[in-house]
Image (tube, helix red, strand yellow):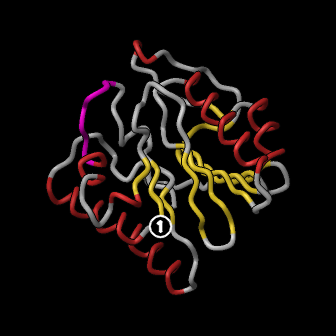
Amino acid sequence: QAEKVVAHAKKHRFSVNCLGDVFDTFSNDEKTILQGSKLIQECELTLAGNHDVSNKIGDIGSLKMLEELEEVYVKVLISPDPGKPYFACKRLGCVMAYAIPHCLTQEIFVESVKLACAKASEGEDSNILLLHCNVGDGIVGNVEDGGSSLWLTEELQELTLTCFEKILVGHEHLPRQLHQGRLVVLGNTFPVSY
């Protein structure tokens, strides 16, 4: 299914980005890794999702391994230090994209969002925000308890909508639009969201 999405987007000259969960599990067999590599090469940017990273610092999973390959490393966005806030900027066509890969904790996610908002507010470009998280006010799990859910809370939505024209979110499986279509949960029956 992902190959069809990528082919359609390229045919119509859309920017193709993966907003997390290239893989369904952290560690994969060779065939699955090869398939993931081919998909990443077709994307301009690939965020690490919760299925792509481990809450154990130092673990190297399938996406991290692919990040080491020369032909894909510039396209994969994994936090270099998962214990610290992080975002990255990349020009995608006529907009500046600010992207935040999956973080270890809600606190790190909130700080990453705030840093991205501060940086986006400095420029005059059209800005979009790319995330891998839940949308709404949910229950935040503790990493120690095996929870890793991140939430773009109502408060964070208000903040980000002052800094970004559009917010695109991967992770949730049901598509929906909020704030007059400015916040789009891509949704996908398969974990990957493009």
Q: Quadrant of the N terminus?
A: bottom left
Q: Which region of the structure is painted magenta?
A: 56-62
> In the displayed structure, would residue 194 be above or below residue 139?
below
In the rendered image, residue 147, in percent from the top left (x then y), is placed at: 45, 21
Residue at (60%, 56%) from the top-left corner? Answer: 186
Q: Position of residue 32 (x, y in %)?
A: 22, 57
Using residue 31 as the reference point, say whether residue 125 is left or right of it: right
Q: Is residue 95 magenta?
A: no
Q: Secondary structure at mark 1?
A: loop
Going by the image, does 91 lie left or right of 38? right
Mark 1 Cα within 10 Å, few/some/many (few <14, many 20+)? Answer: some
At x 54% / y 31%, what residue is drawn? 85
User: Overall secondary structure of the magenta stretch?
Assistant: loop
- Residue type at mark 1 is Glu
Residue underneath mark 1: 44
Q: What percent of the width, then of the height, locates residue 25?
A: 30, 42
Residue at image location 70% in from the left, 52% down from the top? 167
